[in-house]
Amino acid sequence: MTAEFEQRGVAIGRRSFLAGAAGLAGIGVAAQAQFAESPPMPAAWTDAEQLPLWPQGTPTSGFAAKPLPPGWPDIMVRNIERPVLRVFRPGTSNGRALLAIPGGAYTFVSILNEGVDIARAMTARGYTVFVLTYRLPDEGWAGRADVPLQDAQRAMRVIRAQAKRYGYDPATVAAVGFSAGGHLGATLATCFAEPVYRARDAIDALDARPAAIGLIYPVISVTAPVTHAESALRLLGTVPSADLVARRSPALHVTPQTPPVFLVHAVDDGAVPVENSMIMLRALQAAKRPVETHLFEEGGHGFGLGPLDKPWGHWSSLFAAWLDRHLAPR
């Protein structure tokens, strides 16, 4: 639908943003011109069923909407006061579900190339896909470093609570996260039991641990020079304490309970260095956890599914085969 345009247009503007360190204030005329060419919000997104995460209100308050630069694309979602899951159902279910966590430097949520396109690819394989628009930590929320994890934990629990309704096994709910969404996915995989909010209802008694998780060009480190500076700034603030940095460094929290992990990164990634995935790989190996890693010579950052005529455009097939191994009945 839009994957080709993503490679030509929107991804260029997104990469221009991610490669910078000045955030919204640093978006120049050239990037704004690229944004002006971006496609409209896809109908697949606007028409999708929505499941609210927090019907009774979010665990923390303080949300403050921010003005957006001229021409800011609708598909790079900001000002998220009410996080939701959008549901994409397969023609024929394989009995499994997948939580997709798009990236965007914790500054926006990239719902097209890391949301709608991923849902299209994985529903074709029988997965019921839930794409998460999570709250962004730098939009006024109290306890900013916990806000995305609150939403990710709750999302896993809501998905498990809906298993009978949509027809999949709650034990086989996997996840996939991209870029900053990969950091959130890695945090979910390692801190799924961290008490970051008070239980609201029976849903919160359910397990938030993914059965398996893919981390695609993920941010893992939150310290220079390896981290993506914008992501770390938005999540942790300008002068985070050493304890806060440690809490949100997921490689430090890998344990024997960490689910199997599938890592994808391009060696030429100019926004999030490939060392991020290597850090996670080494931590998983040290803990003797199942891990598969695919490093591509080219691809850059933010490629989503990637083009089918390039090597990095085949990671989703590798991921699906890997999920078959780890989610199949033992």
Image (tube, grey):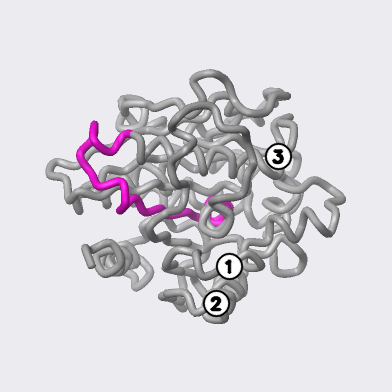
Q: CA distance from mark 2 to mark 1?
A: 7 Å
Callout 3 amino acid: Leu
Q: Quadrant of the N terminus?
A: top left
Label number found at residue 254:
1
Residue at the spot 69% in from the left edge and 24% down from the top edge: 61
Could you say where residue 297 lies in the image, as x and y percent from the top left?
Answer: 46, 78
Q: Horizontal placement of 143 versus 2: left or right?
A: right
Residue at numbered disc 3: 24
Label 3, secondary structure: give it.
helix
Label 2, secondary structure: give it.
loop
User: Foreground residue, 170 or 13?
Assistant: 170
Q: Is residue 183 magenta?
A: yes
User: Foreground residue, 299 or 223?
Assistant: 223
Could you say where residue 25 lies in the image, as x and y percent from the top left?
Answer: 75, 39
Residue at the spot 23% in from the left edge and 38% down from the top edge: 89
Label number found at residue 275:
none
Mark toward the start of the polypeptide (3 vs 2): 3
Q: Is residue 197 visible?
A: yes
Label 1, secondary structure: give it.
loop
Outermost residue toward the top in this view:
56
Residue at numbered disc 2: 287
Residue at the spot 69% in from the left edge and 56% down from the top edge: 248
Q: Look at the picture and state if 298 lies above or below 44.
A: below
Do tag 2 and tag 1 residues touch (Cβ < 8 Å)?
yes
Callout 1 amino acid: Val
Q: CA distance from mark 3 to mark 2?
A: 39 Å
Q: Which residues are magenta?
A: 162-184
Q: Is residue 181 magenta?
A: yes
